[in-house]
Image (tube, helix red, strand yellow):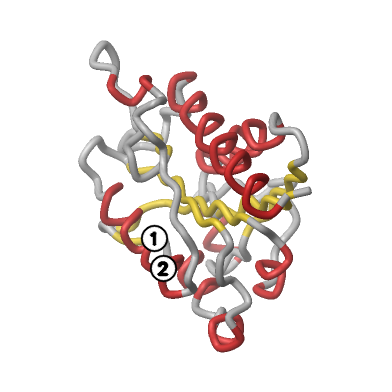
Amino acid sequence: MAKILVLYHSTYGHLEVMAQAVAEGAAQVEGAQVDIKRVPETVPQELAEKSGYKLDQAAPIAVIDDLKNYDAIIIGAGTRFGSVASQMRAFLDQAGGLWFTGALLGKIGGAFTATATQHGGQETTFQGLHNFFMHHGMPVVGLPYAFQGQSRLDEITGGSPYGASTITGSDGSRMPSENELDGARFQGRHIAELATKLHG
């Protein structure tokens, strides 16, 4: 059995929905066990409440040592000025001990993200997350063009060969489209299939 972790941070709920879709896709693979966890919120409670953060998310809070217990780790984090949101960076920066012992070596890594606009830094955010995986010796798996939905031109859509993604709108009012969720499911299933072959 391959163990898959979908680990995310979601400020307003967009990446929570994407994480659920990634997990749904991974769970379709026979022999895959899938968990969804989120990283701690670092913004003070009062400010988060005033800013309209979605604070009622069901996923349990992860600790850094959880990562060593999985065969594949799929990370979802929003973009902040072309980089990974600080909450996820703060969590991943605790992985020095895992790096030192090689605890993540050979595990599969994948990522998904969200931006407010079509050209809001998705690819640079993926690059940052992929760098984390490569520093730990993890092979990186994106969203292949076998998912043809990322090539659509009839609607605004996220998705790239680097990973599933969504576009939220500058006011955060746009939730992931069905096409974007299909991309997330495809990536989750694809990674789980590979993890099952490697570690199952």
Q: Amino acid at mark 2?
A: Met
- Residue 60, position as x, y percentages in the image: 75, 56
Q: Quadrant of residue 173?
A: top left
Which residue sits furthest left?
119
Q: Is residue 195 above or below residue 65?
A: above
Q: Crowding near pointer 1: few (<14 within 10 Å), some, many (20+)?
A: many
Q: Crowding near pointer 2: few (<14 within 10 Å), some, many (20+)?
A: some
Residue for point 67% across, 45% down: 196
Residue for point 58% across, 44% down: 194
Given contact means CB atoms under 8 Å apart, are the residues at marks 1 and 2 in contact?
yes
Give the residue number, with chain letter if any, for mark 1.
130
Asked whether 171 or 156 is in front, the reply is 156
State left or right for residue 57 relative to residue 51: right
Secondary structure state at the residue bearing disc 1: helix
Give the residue number, with chain letter if any, for mark 2.
134
Q: Amino acid at mark 1?
A: His
Q: Is residue 19 above or below residue 200?
A: above
Q: Is residue 118 above or below residue 50?
A: above
Q: CA distance from mark 1 to mark 2?
A: 6 Å
State left or right for residue 197 relative to residue 175: right
